[in-house]
Amino acid sequence: RRTRRRNESIEMTIDRMDEEILYAINNGSTNAYRVWITLGNPIAYKNVYLRVRKLAKSGMLERIKIPPEIDMHGRKDYRVSKEGKIVIRQRIKRLQEIVK
């Protein structure tokens, strides 16, 4: 098994659902459960969780540290990274071109 170096990028495709998840996290839903609720449950929670993990592993999301007194259950919160914001901007630009 080959391990990834710290700055080595992962080749991955981002589909519409991944874009929706990035957009939801950018708008304040910081964990997989909140994203699932915000999206209106279009897919199973486990699939949202797996996609959030994939986006975090690829560098689109950054983990937010939560103090242990607030987080009693081991919740993992995220925010959109610079790479993720680029994807969001591209999506908005693509949607604007469609509307024209």
Image (cartoon, helix red, strand yellow):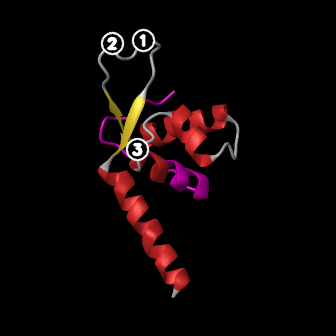
- Residue nearest the observer in this picture, 99 or 60: 99
Mark 1 closeness class: few <14, some 14–19, many ≥20 residues within 10 Å: few
Mark identifier at residue 93: none
Residue 10 sits in quarter: top left
Q: Secondary structure at mark 3?
A: loop
Please state which amino acid type lies under the numbered disc 1: Met
Q: Which residue is mark 1?
A: 72
Q: Main secondary structure of the magenta part?
A: loop
Q: Secondary structure at mark 1?
A: loop
- Do residues under tags 1 and 2 come within 8 Å of each other at their CB atoms? yes
Q: Confirm whether the magenta stretch covers residue 13.
A: yes
> Taking 16 as reference, is 41 above or below it?
above
Mark 3 closeness class: few <14, some 14–19, many ≥20 residues within 10 Å: some
- Residue at 49% over, 74% down: 94
Mark 2–mark 3 distance (CA, rounded to whole Å): 20 Å
> Taking 83 as reference, is 2 above or below it?
above
Where's residue 29, x and y in %? Answer: 45, 41
- Residue at 65% over, 37% down: 47
Q: Which residue is mark 2?
A: 68
Where's residue 67, x and y in %? Answer: 29, 17
Mark 1–mark 3 distance (CA, rounded to whole Å): 20 Å
- Residue nearest the observer in this picture, 60 or 39: 39
The residue furthest bottom is: 100
Q: Secondary structure at mark 2?
A: loop
Q: Which residue is mark 3?
A: 28
- Residue at 49% over, 82% down: 97
Where's residue 28, x and y in %? Answer: 40, 44
**Magenta residues?**
1-21
Please state which amino acid type lies under the numbered disc 2: Pro
- Residue 13 visible in the snapshot: no
